[in-house]
Amino acid sequence: MMAMNRMALFLTSEQNTTTTLDSESNELLQGLRILLLGEAAQKHMMVKFSISNARYTYIHDEKYPSKDVDIHHIVLKRSSAKYLFVYATTLLVLVCALYLYVLKEKSVSIVYYSLLFDMFLVKLFLLKPIKKESVVIMPAFGVQLETHYVSGKITRCFVPIDKILKPILLECVTPMTCYWTLSLIVREKSEMVLVFKNLRPPVKMLVHVWKALCAATDSKEKTCIQTE
C-alpha cells in the first residue's frame, strides 16, 4: 500500500512538472512570436514608399522619426546570371590553358596569361560592386550623397544647402541610348553634381527624389533635355 502511494505521488509530481514545463515553453514561444512580429512591423514601418523594376528598387525610407531627415535609396538588384557567367568563363579559360600545357606541351606562360585574364575578368565585373546609392536630405543643413558597396564600404559627399542653387532632372540623348539623370547646380562649381553617379534608374524613380530636393531647396520643378 505504501509503495502504491509513493508511486501515485511520483506520477502526480512528474505530471505537475511536465505541465509547468509545457506552460513555460508556451510562454517562451509566445514571447518569441511577439518579438518577431514586432521586428517585422518595425521594418515595415521604416519603408514609406517603394517602386521596383527588373534592375532597380526605389525606397523612400523613414529610418528616423524626425521629419527633418528625408532618405531615398536606389538599390541595385544582384544578378546571379552575371556571377555565374564570370565564374564559368574563368574556369573554362583556366581548364583550356591547363589542357594546352599538359597534353599539347605548350609553354607554361599560357597558364600565367590565363590566370592574368581571369583576374582581369573578376576585377572588371565583380570588384567593388555597387549595392545601392542613397540621398539623405536635411533641409536645415544640406544633402548627403552616399554610395554603398557590397563589401560594406561607404563613400559620402555632403553638399551644404546654401550652396545648392537648383536640382535638375536631365534627359540625356545619345546616338545609342537615352536615359535620365538627376543633378544639382551648385554655387561656385563649374560642373553639376550627379546625385546618382554609378546607377541609372528610370525617371519614374528619379522624380520622387527630384521633388524632395526641390521642396528642400525651395526650387521650382523644371526638367531639361541634354544632347550628347
Image (cartoon, rainbow, N blue to C red):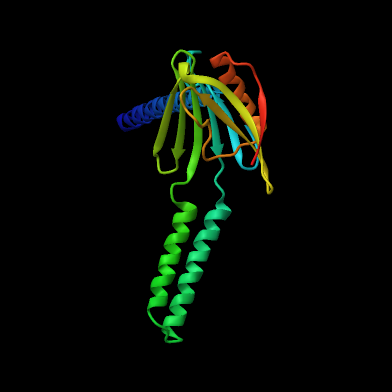
Quadrant that contains the C terminus: top right
Quadrant that contains the N terminus: top left
Residue 19 is drawn in which quadrant? top left
28 to 219, vertically: above or below: below
* Residue in view at x 39 percent, y 39 percent: 153
Count the marks: how many? 0
* Residue in view at x 59 percent, y 16 percent: 219
Q: In the rendering, at what x and y percent does residue 146 appear?
A: 45, 32
Choose between 212 and 162: the one closer to the eye: 162
* Residue in view at x 48 percent, y 27 percent: 36
Question: With 132 as the anchor, is 56 left or right in this view?
Answer: right
32 to 112, vertically: above or below: above
Choose between 224 and 189: the one closer to the eye: 189
Residue 170 is drawn in which quadrant? top right
69 to 22, vertically: above or below: above
Question: With 140 as the anchor, is 7 left or right in this view?
Answer: left
Q: In the rendering, at what x and y percent does residue 100 appear?
A: 46, 81
Q: Inspect this view and state whether residue 87 appears.
A: yes
Q: Inspect this view and state whether residue 49 appears.
A: no
Q: In the rendering, at what x and y percent does residue 115 appear?
A: 41, 68
Q: In the rendering, at what x and y percent does residue 218 appear?
A: 57, 13
